[in-house]
Amino acid sequence: MDFTTIISVNDLFNKLDNPNWAIVDCRSYPSEPEQGYQEYLEGHIPGAIYAHLDRNLSGEIIPGKTSRHPLPDVQEFTDTLSTWGIDRQTQVIAYDNSGGAIAARLWWMLRWVGHGCAAVLNGGWSAWIERGYAQESQESFRSRRLFTPHLDPEIVVDTQFVNEIRLDPEYLLIDARAPERFWGLEEPIDSIAGHIPGAVSAPYSENLTEDGYFQPDEVLTERYRDLLGDYSSIKTILYCGSGVTAIHNIIAMVQVGYDMPLLYPGSWSEWITDPSRPIAP
Protein backbone atom coordinates (compact mmCIF):
# COMPACT_ATOMS: atom_id res chain seq x y z
CA MET A 1 0.00 0.00 0.00
CA ASP A 2 1.31 3.41 -0.99
CA PHE A 3 0.74 6.44 1.25
CA THR A 4 0.09 9.55 -0.82
CA THR A 5 -1.20 12.23 1.58
CA ILE A 6 -1.13 11.60 5.34
CA ILE A 7 0.20 8.69 7.41
CA SER A 8 -0.20 7.82 11.10
CA VAL A 9 2.75 7.26 13.40
CA ASN A 10 1.61 3.67 13.95
CA ASP A 11 1.70 2.94 10.22
CA LEU A 12 5.16 4.47 9.98
CA PHE A 13 6.42 2.54 12.99
CA ASN A 14 5.33 -0.73 11.37
CA LYS A 15 7.43 0.07 8.28
CA LEU A 16 10.43 1.55 10.04
CA ASP A 17 12.83 -1.18 8.88
CA ASN A 18 11.69 -1.13 5.25
CA PRO A 19 14.71 -0.02 3.16
CA ASN A 20 12.39 1.28 0.46
CA TRP A 21 10.92 3.84 2.86
CA ALA A 22 12.75 7.16 3.26
CA ILE A 23 11.91 9.34 6.26
CA VAL A 24 12.70 13.05 6.03
CA ASP A 25 12.82 15.41 9.01
CA CYS A 26 11.70 18.91 7.94
CA ARG A 27 11.71 20.73 11.27
CA SER A 28 12.27 24.44 10.75
CA TYR A 29 12.01 27.76 12.59
CA PRO A 30 11.68 30.99 10.55
CA SER A 31 13.60 33.12 13.02
CA GLU A 32 16.26 30.48 13.78
CA PRO A 33 17.19 28.75 10.50
CA GLU A 34 19.61 26.26 12.09
CA GLN A 35 17.52 25.30 15.13
CA GLY A 36 15.62 22.58 13.30
CA TYR A 37 18.85 20.87 12.25
CA GLN A 38 20.26 21.08 15.77
CA GLU A 39 17.11 19.48 17.17
CA TYR A 40 17.38 16.79 14.51
CA LEU A 41 20.92 15.97 15.66
CA GLU A 42 19.69 15.73 19.24
CA GLY A 43 16.91 13.31 18.35
CA HIS A 44 14.96 12.13 15.31
CA ILE A 45 12.99 9.18 13.98
CA PRO A 46 15.47 6.34 13.34
CA GLY A 47 16.90 6.49 9.85
CA ALA A 48 15.49 9.94 9.08
CA ILE A 49 17.54 12.33 6.95
CA TYR A 50 17.27 16.08 7.39
CA ALA A 51 15.85 18.56 4.86
CA HIS A 52 16.74 22.20 5.42
CA LEU A 53 13.98 24.52 4.22
CA ASP A 54 16.36 27.18 2.93
CA ARG A 55 19.12 24.96 1.51
CA ASN A 56 17.26 21.85 0.30
CA LEU A 57 13.66 22.91 -0.32
CA SER A 58 14.25 26.40 -1.70
CA GLY A 59 16.29 28.01 -4.44
CA GLU A 60 18.37 31.16 -4.67
CA ILE A 61 16.70 34.33 -3.43
CA ILE A 62 16.99 37.21 -5.89
CA PRO A 63 16.25 40.43 -3.98
CA GLY A 64 13.44 42.42 -5.52
CA LYS A 65 12.36 39.54 -7.74
CA THR A 66 11.73 36.24 -5.94
CA SER A 67 9.86 35.18 -2.84
CA ARG A 68 11.57 34.33 0.44
CA HIS A 69 11.46 30.63 -0.50
CA PRO A 70 11.59 30.31 -4.29
CA LEU A 71 11.43 26.84 -5.77
CA PRO A 72 14.87 25.34 -6.39
CA ASP A 73 16.24 24.39 -9.77
CA VAL A 74 14.67 21.07 -10.77
CA GLN A 75 18.00 19.35 -11.45
CA GLU A 76 19.42 20.59 -8.17
CA PHE A 77 16.41 19.25 -6.28
CA THR A 78 16.47 15.88 -8.02
CA ASP A 79 20.20 15.59 -7.31
CA THR A 80 19.34 16.16 -3.64
CA LEU A 81 16.72 13.41 -3.77
CA SER A 82 19.26 11.05 -5.31
CA THR A 83 21.75 11.88 -2.55
CA TRP A 84 19.04 11.14 0.01
CA GLY A 85 18.55 7.67 -1.49
CA ILE A 86 15.17 8.45 -3.03
CA ASP A 87 14.10 7.20 -6.43
CA ARG A 88 10.70 6.85 -8.06
CA GLN A 89 10.01 3.59 -6.21
CA THR A 90 10.74 4.99 -2.74
CA GLN A 91 7.96 5.68 -0.28
CA VAL A 92 8.78 9.07 1.28
CA ILE A 93 7.49 10.16 4.68
CA ALA A 94 8.04 13.78 5.70
CA TYR A 95 7.53 15.16 9.20
CA ASP A 96 8.09 18.34 11.18
CA ASN A 97 6.99 19.96 14.44
CA SER A 98 4.62 22.44 12.77
CA GLY A 99 1.53 20.36 12.11
CA GLY A 100 2.90 19.37 8.72
CA ALA A 101 3.25 22.95 7.45
CA ILE A 102 6.90 22.48 6.40
CA ALA A 103 6.75 18.75 5.64
CA ALA A 104 3.97 19.44 3.14
CA ARG A 105 6.44 21.55 1.12
CA LEU A 106 8.52 18.43 0.46
CA TRP A 107 5.35 16.43 -0.28
CA TRP A 108 4.31 19.00 -2.90
CA MET A 109 7.77 19.30 -4.43
CA LEU A 110 7.83 15.54 -4.93
CA ARG A 111 4.48 15.80 -6.74
CA TRP A 112 5.98 18.63 -8.78
CA VAL A 113 8.80 16.38 -10.04
CA GLY A 114 6.43 13.48 -10.67
CA HIS A 115 6.68 11.40 -7.51
CA GLY A 116 3.31 10.76 -5.88
CA CYS A 117 4.39 8.15 -3.34
CA ALA A 118 4.91 10.56 -0.46
CA ALA A 119 3.01 11.40 2.71
CA VAL A 120 3.15 13.72 5.71
CA LEU A 121 3.30 12.24 9.20
CA ASN A 122 0.13 13.17 11.05
CA GLY A 123 1.06 14.82 14.33
CA GLY A 124 4.72 14.96 13.35
CA TRP A 125 7.60 14.67 15.76
CA SER A 126 5.40 15.34 18.79
CA ALA A 127 3.13 12.39 17.96
CA TRP A 128 6.15 10.11 17.59
CA ILE A 129 7.52 11.15 20.99
CA GLU A 130 4.12 10.91 22.69
CA ARG A 131 3.95 7.22 21.80
CA GLY A 132 7.35 6.58 23.26
CA TYR A 133 8.80 5.28 20.01
CA ALA A 134 12.57 5.02 19.59
CA GLN A 135 14.67 7.92 18.41
CA GLU A 136 18.28 8.32 17.43
CA SER A 137 20.78 11.15 17.46
CA GLN A 138 23.46 12.33 15.05
CA GLU A 139 23.00 12.32 11.28
CA SER A 140 21.50 9.49 9.26
CA PHE A 141 22.36 8.61 5.67
CA ARG A 142 20.90 6.44 2.93
CA SER A 143 22.61 4.80 -0.02
CA ARG A 144 22.41 6.90 -3.16
CA ARG A 145 19.70 6.14 -5.71
CA LEU A 146 18.98 7.81 -9.02
CA PHE A 147 15.85 9.98 -9.11
CA THR A 148 14.54 10.70 -12.60
CA PRO A 149 12.12 13.65 -12.64
CA HIS A 150 8.92 13.92 -14.65
CA LEU A 151 8.04 17.55 -14.08
CA ASP A 152 4.39 18.56 -13.70
CA PRO A 153 4.32 22.28 -14.58
CA GLU A 154 0.52 22.27 -14.64
CA ILE A 155 0.26 22.53 -10.83
CA VAL A 156 2.24 25.79 -10.65
CA VAL A 157 1.23 29.34 -11.60
CA ASP A 158 3.31 32.49 -11.71
CA THR A 159 2.70 36.10 -10.75
CA GLN A 160 1.49 37.12 -14.19
CA PHE A 161 -1.10 34.36 -14.20
CA VAL A 162 -2.36 35.32 -10.74
CA ASN A 163 -2.62 38.97 -11.75
CA GLU A 164 -4.64 38.02 -14.83
CA ILE A 165 -7.15 35.77 -13.06
CA ARG A 166 -7.46 37.29 -9.59
CA LEU A 167 -10.81 38.89 -10.47
CA ASP A 168 -11.89 36.17 -12.89
CA PRO A 169 -15.14 34.61 -11.60
CA GLU A 170 -14.01 31.16 -12.78
CA TYR A 171 -11.01 31.14 -10.44
CA LEU A 172 -10.75 31.08 -6.66
CA LEU A 173 -7.65 32.63 -5.06
CA ILE A 174 -7.01 31.52 -1.46
CA ASP A 175 -4.62 33.09 1.05
CA ALA A 176 -3.46 30.56 3.68
CA ARG A 177 -1.85 33.03 6.10
CA ALA A 178 -3.26 34.03 9.46
CA PRO A 179 -6.23 36.45 9.28
CA GLU A 180 -4.21 39.26 10.88
CA ARG A 181 -1.73 39.13 8.01
CA PHE A 182 -4.42 38.77 5.36
CA TRP A 183 -6.22 41.89 6.59
CA GLY A 184 -2.99 43.84 6.98
CA LEU A 185 -3.42 44.25 10.74
CA GLU A 186 0.09 42.97 11.34
CA GLU A 187 2.99 41.76 9.23
CA PRO A 188 5.83 40.17 11.21
CA ILE A 189 7.83 38.92 8.21
CA ASP A 190 7.31 40.83 4.97
CA SER A 191 7.88 44.52 4.32
CA ILE A 192 4.31 45.28 3.24
CA ALA A 193 1.05 44.15 4.83
CA GLY A 194 -2.18 43.17 3.11
CA HIS A 195 -3.31 40.63 0.55
CA ILE A 196 -3.76 40.14 -3.18
CA PRO A 197 -7.03 41.79 -4.27
CA GLY A 198 -9.66 39.17 -5.06
CA ALA A 199 -8.28 36.59 -2.63
CA VAL A 200 -10.23 35.01 0.22
CA SER A 201 -8.80 34.07 3.60
CA ALA A 202 -8.48 30.40 4.64
CA PRO A 203 -5.74 30.01 7.26
CA TYR A 204 -3.94 26.69 7.02
CA SER A 205 -4.03 26.41 10.82
CA GLU A 206 -7.74 25.62 10.62
CA ASN A 207 -6.84 22.27 9.07
CA LEU A 208 -5.43 21.24 12.45
CA THR A 209 -6.74 20.17 15.82
CA GLU A 210 -5.48 21.89 18.97
CA ASP A 211 -2.85 19.18 19.43
CA GLY A 212 -1.44 19.50 15.93
CA TYR A 213 -3.11 16.67 14.02
CA PHE A 214 -5.02 17.05 10.78
CA GLN A 215 -8.72 17.45 11.38
CA PRO A 216 -10.82 14.35 10.64
CA ASP A 217 -11.72 13.89 7.00
CA GLU A 218 -15.35 14.83 7.57
CA VAL A 219 -14.29 18.18 9.08
CA LEU A 220 -11.90 18.91 6.21
CA THR A 221 -14.53 17.89 3.68
CA GLU A 222 -17.03 20.33 5.14
CA ARG A 223 -14.44 23.09 5.35
CA TYR A 224 -13.43 22.91 1.71
CA ARG A 225 -16.94 22.24 0.44
CA ASP A 226 -18.01 25.49 2.08
CA LEU A 227 -14.91 27.31 0.86
CA LEU A 228 -14.96 26.19 -2.77
CA GLY A 229 -18.69 26.07 -3.34
CA ASP A 230 -19.09 25.68 -7.10
CA TYR A 231 -15.42 26.35 -7.88
CA SER A 232 -13.32 23.55 -9.34
CA SER A 233 -10.21 22.63 -7.38
CA ILE A 234 -8.17 22.74 -10.59
CA LYS A 235 -9.10 26.42 -10.88
CA THR A 236 -8.31 27.11 -7.24
CA ILE A 237 -5.00 28.82 -6.49
CA LEU A 238 -3.30 28.75 -3.10
CA TYR A 239 -0.73 31.20 -1.79
CA CYS A 240 0.73 32.30 1.55
CA GLY A 241 3.76 34.36 2.53
CA SER A 242 6.44 32.51 0.60
CA GLY A 243 4.85 29.44 -0.97
CA VAL A 244 5.34 27.03 1.94
CA THR A 245 2.35 26.88 4.29
CA ALA A 246 -0.20 27.29 1.47
CA ILE A 247 0.59 23.69 0.60
CA HIS A 248 -0.96 22.58 3.87
CA ASN A 249 -4.33 23.55 2.39
CA ILE A 250 -3.45 21.68 -0.79
CA ILE A 251 -2.64 18.42 0.97
CA ALA A 252 -5.79 18.73 3.08
CA MET A 253 -7.85 19.13 -0.08
CA VAL A 254 -6.21 16.17 -1.80
CA GLN A 255 -6.65 14.08 1.35
CA VAL A 256 -10.44 14.43 1.11
CA GLY A 257 -10.65 13.72 -2.60
CA TYR A 258 -10.14 16.98 -4.47
CA ASP A 259 -8.04 17.09 -7.61
CA MET A 260 -4.71 18.85 -7.16
CA PRO A 261 -5.27 22.62 -6.92
CA LEU A 262 -2.74 25.17 -8.12
CA LEU A 263 0.10 26.70 -6.14
CA TYR A 264 1.42 30.23 -6.55
CA PRO A 265 4.88 29.55 -5.08
CA GLY A 266 5.99 33.18 -5.25
CA SER A 267 3.10 34.15 -2.96
CA TRP A 268 2.85 37.43 -1.07
CA SER A 269 6.60 37.99 -0.69
CA GLU A 270 7.04 37.89 -4.47
CA TRP A 271 3.85 39.81 -5.23
CA ILE A 272 5.05 42.84 -3.26
CA THR A 273 8.42 43.07 -5.05
CA ASP A 274 6.74 45.15 -7.77
CA PRO A 275 5.08 48.34 -6.42
CA SER A 276 2.80 48.49 -9.48
CA ARG A 277 0.93 45.38 -8.36
CA PRO A 278 -2.28 46.16 -6.47
CA ILE A 279 -2.60 45.49 -2.75
CA ALA A 280 -5.70 45.15 -0.61
CA PRO A 281 -5.54 46.03 3.10
Image: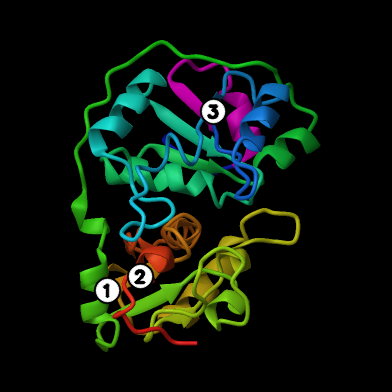
The verdict on residue 64 being magenta is no
Q: Regarding mark 3 in the picture, which secondary structure is present there?
A: strand
Say whether disc 1 or disc 3 marks the residue closer to the N-terminus.
3
Residue 121 in the figure: left or right of residue 171: right
Residue 95 in view here: yes
Q: Nearer the viewer, residue 33 or 51?
A: 33
Say whether disc 1 or disc 2 marks the residue closer to the N-terminus.
1
Crowd rating for badge 1 (residues with CA inside 10 Å; few <14, some 14–19, many 20+) = some
Which residue: 50% across, 14% down?
141
Task: Return the residue at label 3.
Answer: 50
Residue 260 in the figure: left or right of residue 176: left
Task: Return the residue at label 2.
Answer: 271
Q: Are marks 1 and 2 in contact (CB under 8 Å)?
A: yes
Task: Return the residue at label 1.
Answer: 162
Residue 15 image point, x, y percent: 56, 24
Nearer the camera: disc 2 or disc 3 = 2
Q: Amino acid at mark 3?
A: Tyr
Q: Is residue 190 above or below residue 200?
A: above
Q: Nearer the viewer, residue 1 or 116?
A: 116
